[in-house]
Every structure is written in structure tokens, then in C-alpha cells.
Amino acid sequence: MKKCTPLWREAHFDVNIVIVVVVVVVVVVVVVVVVVVVVVVVVVAVVVVVVVVFVVVVVVFVVVVVVVFVVVVVVVVAVVVVCSM
């Protein structure tokens, strides 16, 4: 038995509006959460890349310094050996 009185129609319309509002709010919240998660993932990825690049640069710098130091020591030892002959 369907109630088709104007009061029933108005109440049914109000319920439908509430359902639509709830659905819209849920969709907006889900979209905001997804956007926040994507932004956080991108920021973390950028930070990781920056840290990796920094570590690589530091390692290369240390290797270059060590190689230069070894070359200088070898040259000094060679000069000392040659001069002492």
C-alpha cells in the first residue's frame, strides 16, 4: 500500500535529499583522502630522491678526496725515494 499523500511525498523528498547530501559528503571525503595520500606519497618520493642524490654526491666526494690523497702520498713518497738516491 503506497502512501501518496502530500505529506508523505514531502517526507520522502526530505529523505532523498539527506541521502544525496550524505553521498556527496562521503564522495568529497574520499576524494580529499585520496588527494592527501597522493600528495604525501609524492612528497615522500621526492624526499627519498633528494636524500639518495645527496648520499651519492657525498660518496663521490669522499672517493675523490681519498683518491687525490693517495695520489699525493704516492707522489711525495716517489719524490723522497728519488731524491734520496
Image (cartoon, grey):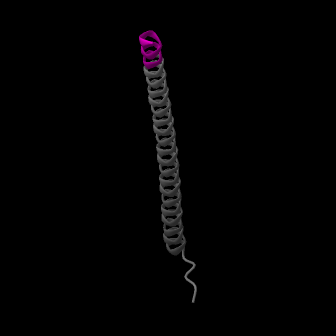
Rendered location of residue 10, percent (x, y) = 51, 68
Rendered location of residue 72, percent (x, y) = 45, 18
In the image, 16 versus 27, the foreground residue is 27
Q: Quadrant of residue 70?
A: top left
Rendered location of residue 34, percent (x, y) = 52, 54
Decide: is 48 above or below 80: below
| Residue ID at (50%, 48%) | 41
Magenta stretch, main secondary structure class? helix
Which residue extends farthest bottom?
A: 1
Decide: is 29 above or below 47: below
Report the magenta residues as a range.
Answer: 76-85
| Residue ID at (52%, 44%) | 42
In the image, 16 versus 50, the foreground residue is 50
* Picture mark count: 0
| Image quadrant in which the N terminus is located | bottom right
Decide: is 49 above or below 24: above
| Image quadrant in which the C terminus is located | top left
Q: Quadrant of residue 2?
A: bottom right
Which residue extends farthest top?
A: 83
| Residue ID at (44%, 27%) | 66
In the image, 41 versus 49, the foreground residue is 49
Q: Is residue 77 magenta?
A: yes
Decide: is 57 above or below 81: below
Looking at the image, residue 73 sits to the left or right of residue 1; the answer is: left
Q: Is residue 64 magenta?
A: no
In the image, 45 versus 56, the foreground residue is 56
